[in-house]
Image (cartoon, rainbow, N blue to C red):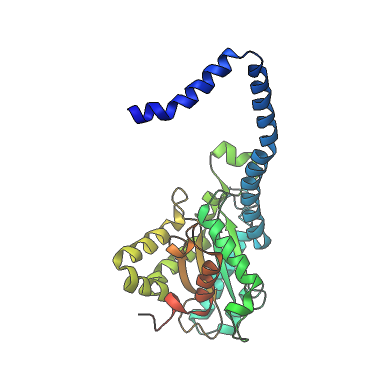
Amino acid sequence: MNILKKIGTPFVAVWRWIKETAWVQPLLIVGIIFAIIFSIPSITRGIQGLVNQTESDLVYFSEHQLSLEGSKVTEDHAPDSAANIFFDDFVEAQSAWGNGNKEEAREIMSSYSNNGDKFFLFFVQDECTGCSSLKEGCEYLENNWSRYVRDENEPGFYFQSIVVDQEIDDDYYEEENKHAIDDLVTYRSYLEFYRIVMSNVANTRYYINVGIRDGSSGQNTIYSNTEALIDTTDLQTPTIMLIDLTDNNETSYIVSEVFYTSDATFSAASEVYDKAQFIADAWTYQGVFGKDYH
């Protein structure tokens, strides 16, 4: 207690002097006011930076967005959004692929892969930390592609995205108290897509290797997250799928990998080049996505 008293004595003396010295008080008040005024730009920049980060994430993913505009289901309207059409095409391509008609499958999906026969499908949303990590990794990978993917036969990086919280300017959604994604997940082709993914998720190389690395807990997370693809109250973002119609995919499914940013590599503290490496590994089936992982 004596030590604390000795430490506090100078501060008490200064405070007493301020209270007893009338001319100091106005100067102190003015100084505080100026300090607040000068700090406002920094505070504003900080807030604006957070806003811009969220906006930039969605701007990045919207470059190849499968819009939900037109997904509503009514007696007078058949769903015709870009997302609905994508899942129609997906189901058709999967059927062709499964029947051995690989060129037909590639042709059906060519516009989604930029004629590269391989692309990621992302489910993302606003205010999503994992989506920010994914965006950082993807952007860095795109800008440093030759550093991570040196096989000249590999198609260039490409993706399609579904922004699950996309707002549609339509009174229908307010009246029905729902969102466009609620309509999409009940669409017949989406339900078939869901059935296909659930049939294959436990056979993907990443799922198998996570079992080696993390045991059943890691596999359970992947499986339960994938189950949530038809539950809009629990749909995980980002959900990441690799759709591969190249000769490297020797399976009977065009969705070759399903994974989530719950992996430690995507933590906010991780370096951006580690995130890029992880995404590149998924693209090229290396590391935890490889056949020889142990």
Up-down relation of residue 280 to residue 188 (above or below): below
Q: Residue at 58% across / 38% down in the picture?
A: 174
Residue 148, x across and y down, in percent: 57, 78
Decide which of 140, 46 is in the foreground and name it. 46
Residue 163, x across and y down, in percent: 58, 54
Q: Is residue 117 visible?
A: no
Left or right of 49? Residue 263 is left
Up-down relation of residue 14 to residue 184 (above or below): above
Q: Residue at 63% across / 86% down in the picture?
A: 152
Task: For the N terminus, give its image quadrant.
Answer: top left
Left or right of 282? Residue 117 is right
Q: Is residue 34 visible?
A: yes
Q: List the single residue furthest toward the left.
A: 216
Up-down relation of residue 29 to residue 146 (above or below): above
Decide which of 12, 29 is in the foreground and name it. 12
Q: How many marks?
A: 0
Decide which of 112, 39 is in the foreground and name it. 39
Task: For the C terminus, give its image quadrant.
Answer: bottom left
Q: Residue at 65% across / 52% down in the picture?
A: 69
Residue 240, x across and y down, in percent: 51, 65
Residue 96, x across and y down, in percent: 54, 79
